[in-house]
Image (cartoon, rainbow, N blue to C red):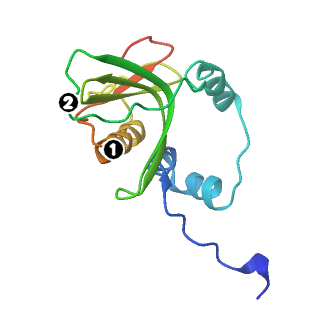
Amino acid sequence: MSESDAISPVPELIPARMLNAFAFCPRLAYLEWVQGEFEDNAETLEGTLRHRRVDVEAGALPQFEPEAEAGEHLHARSVLLSGATCGFIARIDLLELDGPQATPVDYKRGKTPATPERAWEPERIQLCAQGLILREHGYQCNSGVLYFVDSKIR
């Protein structure tokens, strides 16, 4: 067996965006993550364009302080966090902090879907993974926000 035939080790952390991709299409997720096959198309290029503001890192996540009081509003953009216990890693587009309460905001291209939940399942799964990572970092996180750029609706 050659080196190229060797099985790659399983990564320790799963990117939250891969949970989204897997929920959308397991085959596509496999091709992108395992095989490393990815080609931009009109939708991915538009998504990159729409994300340009939130993809600029604007500082690190403030350390959780148990004595933080509600009313202390902070925002952080493009925050990369991981959680060893939950096994996920995610870049959070926008993080809104109000004392110990953290709310991840995930920017999505397109319009708000006409579903009862007003979001597609893959996007909800990705947002839940972000919430689990935030909880692992000591924050209270009971909800998240999807912001659809074309609708300008949270």
| Location of residue 124 (image quadrant) | top left
Residue type indicated by callout 2: Glu
Cα separation, mark 2 vs mark 1, equals 15 Å
Quick one: 113 or 49, which is closer to the camera? 49
Rendered location of residue 90, percent (x, y): 48, 43
Residue sitting at 54 percent across and 64 percent down?
Answer: 11
User: Element under label 1?
Assistant: loop
Quick one: 146 or 83, which is closer to the camera? 83
Q: Does residue 75 sit above or below 123 in this rendering?
A: above
Quick one: 64 or 132, which is closer to the camera? 64
Mark 1, residue position? 137
Mark 2, residue position? 67
User: Element under label 2?
Assistant: loop
Residue type indicated by callout 1: His
- Label number found at residue 21: none
Badge 1 local density, few (<14 within 10 Å), some, or many (20+)? some
Quadrant (top left, top right, bottom left, bottom right) of the C terminus: top left
Rendered location of residue 116, percent (x, y): 26, 27
